[in-house]
């Protein structure tokens, strides 16, 4: 028996699909009672309701499980909300670890984040030896993932067979909600992004992350973390790739990123006024201007991890959005 927490989310539903496609199973999908199960419709998975902040429901869901994939969590591109992020990402992970020990789970795979690592001063390359230090975190989300990662490392040191994966910026098909990157693709395809900024980030296909998690479950070393990176892409190249795939012209005007940072305090009010999810925040601008690159050599060497080309991911995401009436 395999259990996936947060199974209705973007990463969760794609992981369930990957497990089923690989012939793994049976697969039990843990959803909060309020979660929309649409993303799992038609999949051969047992749906159970619970919450990572409800230890009793976790114990019930994990009973009889061989492997637990802990994917449930809260993602935020703003700087605030630390209390809620800690409640879900940190205390929720603490509860998952306790339930895994209580029910005798053989292996736990935790989906952490590249943001758990401290950004090297002046940029540079992030690999698995980069410190995980909540005190050096850039934002509230980073801090919560760093704290949760340290909890998993501690549990592994105390005997729990746990491994971690650290994906970069996730995008791709089956993005039902959609995610921040999915929203960016939608808005760019609708021609609603008037300008671009200098900066770059590493983006990875959600299906490649799922494959990396399966490989980590099968071959990962207890207590180890694996960076699941994809392709380093500039903001300009990202928008031009969307243009090449959709035909919607990419913006030609560049706005200095320093200017946007200086007025970023206005962003929350702006997005509230237009009733849209934030695409750009001070935190996200800091992230794309950090100058960091991500090294997936360890995952390639130990797990056989091989991410696909970036354009293929964008093509498949756009195709899925169109098929599902979101474009």
Image (cartoon, rainbow, N blue to C red):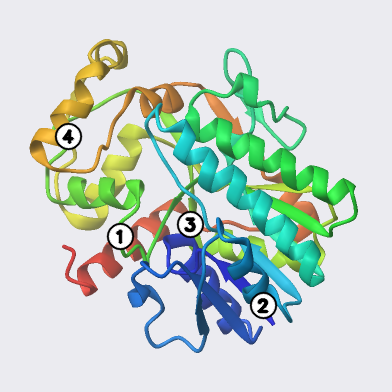
Q: Position of residue 298 (x, y in %)?
A: 76, 47
Single out the residue that lies furthest toward the left: 273
Residue annotated with mark 2: 2
Does dot 2 land on a helix, a strand or a loop?
strand
Q: Mark 3 highlights which residue?
A: 205
Q: CA distance from mark 1 to mark 4?
A: 17 Å
Residue tagged by mark 1?
A: 177
Question: In the picture, residue 279 is in which quadrant?
Answer: top left
Which residue is found at the position 63% from the left and 61% from the top?
A: 55
Name which of mark 1 and mark 4 comes first in the sequence: 1
Q: Residue at x 27, y 68 (%)?
A: 319
Q: Local crowd at mark 3 within 10 Å, few (<14), some, or many (≥20)?
A: many
Residue occupying the point 41% across, 39% down: 76
Q: Position of residue 293 (x, y in %)?
A: 58, 31
Which of the two discs, 3 and 4, sits closer to the camera?
4
Question: What element does badge 1 sit on?
Answer: loop
Whether residue 304 can be seen here: no
């Amino acid at each position: 028996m395999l259990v996936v927490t947060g199974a209705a989310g973007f990463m969760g539903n794609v992981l369930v699909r990957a497990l089923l496609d690989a012939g793994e199973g049976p697969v039990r999908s843990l959803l909060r009672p309020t979660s929309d199960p649409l993303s799992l419709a038609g999949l051969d998975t047992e749906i159970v309701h619970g919450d990572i902040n409800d230890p009793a429901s976790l114990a019930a869901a994990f009973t009889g499980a061989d492997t637990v994939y802990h994917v449930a969590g809260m993602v935020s591109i703003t700087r605030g909300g630390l209390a809620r992020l800690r409640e879900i990402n940190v205390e929720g992970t603490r509860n998952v670890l306790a339930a895994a020990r209580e029910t005798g789970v053989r292996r736990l795979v935790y989906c952490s984040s590249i943001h758990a690592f401290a950004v090297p001063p002046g940029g540079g390359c992030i690999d698995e030896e980069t410190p995980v230090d909540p005190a050096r975190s850039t934002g509230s989300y980073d801090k919560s993932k760093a704290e949760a990662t340290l909890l998993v490392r501690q549990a592994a040191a105390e005997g729990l067979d746990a491994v971690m994966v650290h994906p970069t910026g996730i995008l791709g098909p089956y993005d039902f909600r959609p995610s921040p990157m999915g929203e960016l693709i939608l808005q760019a395809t609708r021609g609603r992004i008037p300008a671009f900024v200098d900066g770059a980030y590493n983006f990875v296909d959600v299906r490649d992350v799922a494959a990396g998690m399966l490989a980590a479950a099968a071959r990962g070393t207890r207590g180890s973390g694996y960076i699941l990176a994809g392709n380093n892409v500039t903001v300009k190249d990202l928008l031009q790739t969307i243009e090449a795939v959709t035909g919607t012209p990419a913006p030609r005007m560049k706005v200095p990123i320093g200017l946007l940072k200086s007025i970023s305090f206005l962003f929350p009010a702006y997005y509230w006024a237009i009733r849209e999810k934030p695409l750009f925040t001070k935190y996200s601008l800091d992230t794309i201007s950090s100058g960091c690159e991500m090294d997936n050599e360890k995952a390639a060497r130990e797990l056989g991890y091989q991410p696909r080309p970036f354009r293929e991911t964008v093509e498949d995401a756009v195709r899925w959005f169109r098929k599902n009436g979101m474009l």
